[in-house]
Amino acid sequence: MRGTQVRVGLARKTLGEWGMAVFGAAASAPMVVLAGGIVATYATTQVMSLPLVFLLVGGVVALLAVGYTAMSRQVPHAAAYYAILARGLGNGWGVAGGLVALVGYNSIQISLYGLLGATLAGLVGGTWWVWSGITVVLVAVLGVRAIALSTRLLATVLVCSLVIVLAFGLSALASPSGGAVSWQGFSVSGLAVGGVGGAVALCLAALMGVDVPGSFAEEAHSGRAVTRAVFGGVFFLTGVYALTAWAMGVAVGPDQVAQVAADPNAALPWSLFEQRLGSVVTVLAEAMLICAIITSLLAFHSVVARYVFAMAREGVLPVALARAGSGTRISAPVGGSLFQTVTAAVVLAGFVVAGADPVAGMFTWLSTLGALGLLCLLLAASLAAMMSLARLRGSRAGVWSSLIAPAFGLALGLVVLTAMVVNVGTLLGAAPGSLKPYVLPLIIVVAAVGGGLWARFLRRARLEIYLGIGLGRPDTHAIPDDVGVTF
């Protein structure tokens, strides 16, 4: 990796809080969580109080987001975690965080190709990897376009998905199992079961994506817009997922929902759509699931592209990846987008050659790897906020944002991380005693150590690059504001 820093920037002031919130919510994909995440969590963990688990995990993510957003306001950077860790913990930690972020975001994005391919093959026939390959091309084409096009597409699909989710919830409440609405899903006593650790881990995975707005800080109207988008996403999605999980329990019966979810012949949630809303709505829901997966792919693709662009701009990655495009202001990080597309194609080809199952293998393993990596980064961002106490206090962030919330988030987040690591074998459906699932935490460690070693090399051999790590966007006078429409 050779080269010097390239002082180009993404078009400024092209995204408001609404546009960034759309990216965060679309990345999390409510339809995917309804059709896959909630059903799988009930089936795997047998936890009846899943709605309460969503609320508790959402609270932990909100606490972790305090330090993350406080730091992102101080370091507006397209590679958010990379810059936050570099400023708060040191340049070596920044490079380590950048590589972990690339592993995490890429893993979640690529996992969705397996889910989409299997879903399309099941609905319309054909080979799953052919559908996945077609989608790689589609995302590649959309990924190099201006952010405004992606925002419109994501917003349309998100609104339609939420209408479907709302219809599902209302139909459950209108005709509850047993004739009465049960609140058992919010019972604290329901947490005293063996599968609660796995439920915590899966709920955390469902919320991954709410941190996405931080990567659009360079294109945002203001740092406050990033903060509002992140917290809006956390609170909104937590509420949606808790209510949706509760509605599923009400529709089936809280005492039976786990058993029914584990029965493949029950076909949750599609059987409920068919019974309560009819075949037309069921078909629409299936179509929206496909669209939601595609927009989630596009959202994570955009984040990876920005990380690659921003790190390449500072010489940490090959500078050619930042020179794609023309002029000093670019509307899309074309080099980073192409890099992500190639990475996705290579990994997809590897799973196809290995004969892996697209859902049990590709989707489950890669999405779990991504969730582990992003949780580690949220923890590191909270630690960085605490280590930057003086800077944050000087910016009027307050003791809550600079110390209290990050400390509580770090402590509770470590509990969630422990639950994920301890239950990783169960989450992946591995045989008891198998060590294969622990390869995933090892990959995160290897990425972090590799980033730290690369930073040490840069410090010795390319000091000018090392000193520029995490500096962020070029001078605002060098990158003019965009005069087009802001979302």
Image: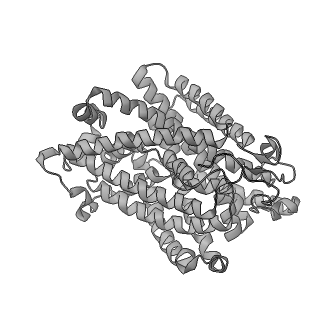
249 and 480: which one is in front?
480
Image coords of residue 480 (percent x, y):
78, 53
* Res. 440 in view: no
Image coords of residue 60 (percent x, y):
44, 65
The residue located at (80%, 46%) in the rendering is 318
163 and 435: which one is in front?
163
Q: Determine which quarter of the picture holds residue 161.
A: top left
The residue located at (68%, 50%) in the rendering is 307
266 and 326: which one is in front?
326
Image coords of residue 231 (percent x, y):
49, 61
Above or below residue 225? Residue 322 is above
Indicate left or right for 363 with 466 as reference.
Answer: left
Q: Determine which quarter of the picture holds residue 351.
A: top right
Above or below residue 381? Residue 45 is above
* Res. 142 in view: yes
Indicate left or right for 219 with 405 as reference.
Answer: right
Indicate left or right for 136 with 171 as reference.
Answer: right
The residue located at (21%, 57%) in the rendering is 184
Indicate left or right for 389 with 472 as reference.
Answer: left
